[in-house]
Amino acid sequence: MLRKLALGGIRSRFRDYAVLFSGLVIASAVFYMFMALATNTKFLTSNSPIGMTPFIFGFGEVLLVIITMVYIVYANTFLMSMRQRDYAMFMMLGAKSRKIAQLIFIETVSVGFLASVVGVVIGMGLTGIAGNMLISMLHAPAAHFAVVWPPALIATFGFFLLMFVLAAFVNAGRLLKTPMLELLHASTLPNRLQQKPWKLIVQGLLAIVLLAIGYWSMTQLAKLQMAAIGIALITIVLGTYFLFNALLVWLIGLLKKNHAYASKGLHTFTLSQLSFRIRDYTKILAVVAILFALALGAITVGLGFQNAIPELANTQSAYDATTIDANAATQQAAAKLTGVTSTTRYTQKVTAKAVVFDQAQITARPLKFVAYDGKTSKHLSLTTNADLTKNMNEIASQLEQFRTPADAQRQIKIVPHAEYVALAGTTRNIVTYQVKDFGANYDAFDAMFKAQNKQLHVTNTQLSGQKMATYGLINEMFSGLAFMGFFLGIAFLAMLASTLMFKILSGASFDASRYLMLQKIGVRPGLLRRSVRQEIGALFAFPGILGVIHVLFGLQLFTTMLHDPYHNIWIPFAIFIVLYGVYYALTVWLYEGIVIKKDLAK
Amino acid sequence: MQNQPVVAVNGITKTYGKKNQKQFQALKGVTFNVQPGEFVGIMGASGSGKTTLLNILSTLDRPTSGSVKINGKDVTALKGDKLSDFRAKQVGFIFQDFNLLENLTARENIALPMALQNISHNKQVEAVNHIAKTLGIDAVLDHYPTELSGGQKQRVAAARALVQNPAILFGDEPTGALDSQSAKELLDTMTSLNQEQGVSILLVTHDPFSASYAQRILFIKDGQIGQELVHGDKSQAAFYQEILSTLGTFQQ
Ligand SMILES: Nc1ncnc2c1ncn2[C@@H]1O[C@H](COP(=O)(O)OP(=O)(O)OP(=O)(O)O)[C@@H](O)[C@H]1O
Ligand SMILES: [Mg+2]
């Protein structure tokens, strides 16, 4: 009988259960995604030139555990808010409390178990899709990357099961202890804003101090090493929470006290909606802010590493590729290049002792090189033999692209036109290529590079002087980091979206009755929609702003690895904010569909 | 020519249930008028269609057929903002289930209709305090609905309906959960509102005593108006007796 009643409860609130379930599924999917990297030490060490990467992921695990815990606790509160009325009713009808406790336990654990099974499957799917997409996009070798990774499976299952067993005990205990009446009315119990002002001030100050310490420690990575990340993790998470708690309680109190504002239209209602369950609310805001910062930060850093590859490669050679007597295979590959900005052709003669250029050709089309001193790069345009000798230090390795391994003993020279014409020796055709976007032509360049290396019998490709050689090397070093950045960015973004959606939709059923009442007493639908937009807007905007600030400071962590982590950051920021905005609009639309009836009389 | 009626109901029917499902006709052709300043009671057994009728009159529901005019305006045709504004300004209602917003205090609940019309804060406070005093809820104004008794909740709901001085007040058993003393107070408030400010009132009730405040009583049975009683010059006590005896015969 009881079982039937319990199932009946689920059926009657199908949408709420769907929201709860899909929220937990995403949480465990993301948890798995993260763990698939974090627990794969081989992958981490072989894809990152940075020795502490596994430790950094260790901190990431701690952070994700905290976030997921808040998420699960929130989900669990939601589950209980749906069920406790029913349970109280069963108890009123005479069900034994031991029986009820058993029922709660089974229900909570099975929800958690089911969600984590489905979540892990989806997590593997996401890991596979995102991973392979990124691998091909970034030409990242991503060695040892594994979609099905048993330690991640165990970690995810273990964590979720543990959390839900704990939650089940807490639920059962709480339900048996809470007075029946309170259970029946729990969803309607208000949360009075009764924080004392000095408490708010202390919290606010504490938040600022904590955030300042966190931000400062991120600039001190070189000195503090791993401690910097640990300190930042603790202080920023706590600081974020205290800041929201103090700021929101204070702000809502202030606005409510401002009668001119509060007594207009639906302002009081909107403020009350925000403060009704303020404690849950600030926790979720803090989680959203952290997730926002993680997602945006990961994507920004990923993009930074991705952009660093061509930037660094550009300091190694002026030409994107050079061919020497290109054979059919090389020419075929070269024909596939897109966005070619310039090609120049030279002839050279190979004599017994030298590889010789014609001064007339070089005067018309100077040879281009880059001089790089480790910080800045300078473009050189050389026209004479004397120029070559003078700059030999900087350009020696770049000159190799005009020779073959067979020319190892031959010196590169530029001689006057008449002398060149008179020289005996085999003539070779040289073509240099420059394109707009090297990365976009990666496959073509790689094919040219391989074909030519085969043709010219280049065994040590690093000495070929080609940009592709250095590009490949840098790519190997950075694409792993870019991969991690984007991969985690996607994972955190999914979690961010799911947290926001969950918070909003989980309240929808309760809110629907309130909005219905407002409509009944004659609130214009337009005004209701504005209230919805404001309420959800606050949920999006506050964490968004703080998240952006977190990232701006957090990028300090990467100043030693990236030439300029702030370079072009407006691009990821703009993309992210547009995405966030679209998501906001979608959420508002969905929510309005649930809580605002088009026509009351239907 | 007579005054234009505040409420003119003409042959409304209401059928619940979709075409292909089990249908139930809750109203089977109801016609009546309420004149300006009139206090009309509606009585009838449980399930006879009173709430259905009131929901249609207050534009919360649409009739299957027939027309409802309030102040000469066909409300069944109203849509969108016009409909909302109509609800906010022209009618006040006290629902059978209290319909308070549980995230607002009693004070905020009562002030809401005024806030919607952007009435100044001071005027809101004044009006809320005044109505709260007349309804005897001034001590609990800062309580949330979960912290109120059933009767207090109903009085808060009444205060919210009355505070905007609507042209017509619909009440669905507003005294249902009140003790006789508070019921009497609420009814007295409504009567004085009716007599002094000319607010028309349409009151659905089971309670003969509450009904005896009305000038006219319509009895509904199985979705139709079966009988009408007029207060006239009779004393309230005599009218009360008449209601009692009518109920006795009517409900058989
Ligand atoms: N949404 C609905 N769908 C189907 N039938 C309904 C619906 N609402 C009411 N009814 C039916 O219509 C009839 C009239 O209901 P109504 O609520 O108007 O009764 P009432 O006179 O207000 O009764 P009470 O005095 O108990 O409040 C009842 O038989 C009820 O079962
Ligand atoms: Mg009714």
Image (tube, coloured by chain):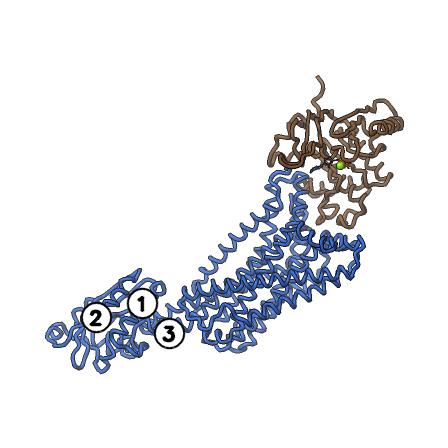
Residue A251 vs A355, above or below: the answer is above
Residue A473 is marked as: 3
Chain painted in brown in the figure: B
Q: CA distance from mark 2 to mark 3?
A: 25 Å
Front residue of A74 and B234: A74
Q: Is residue A558 left or right of residue A190?
A: left
- Ligand 1 under 8 Å from disc 2 Cβ: no
- What crowding class fits label 2: few (fewer than 14 Cα within 10 Å), some (14-19), or many (20 or more)? some
* Residue type (three-letter) at the residue carrying disc 2: Asp
- Ligand 1 under 8 Å from disc 3 Cβ: no
- Residue A254 appears at what percent x and percent y? 67, 53
Element marked by disc 3: helix
Residue B245 is marked as: none
Quadrant location of the C terminus of chain A? top right
Residue A325 is marked as: 2
Q: Chain for mark 3?
A: A
Pointers 2 and 3 in contact (C-beta within 8 Å): no
Element marked by disc 1: helix
- Residue B134 appears at what percent x and percent y? 81, 39
- Residue A343 appears at what percent x and percent y? 25, 64
The nearer-to-camera label among 2 and 3 is 2
Front residue of A270 and A142: A142
* Residue type (three-letter) at the residue carrying disc 1: Phe
Q: Is residue A388 left or right of residue A194?
A: left
Q: CA distance from mark 1 to mark 2?
A: 16 Å
Chain painted in blue in the figure: A
Residue under pointer 1: A445
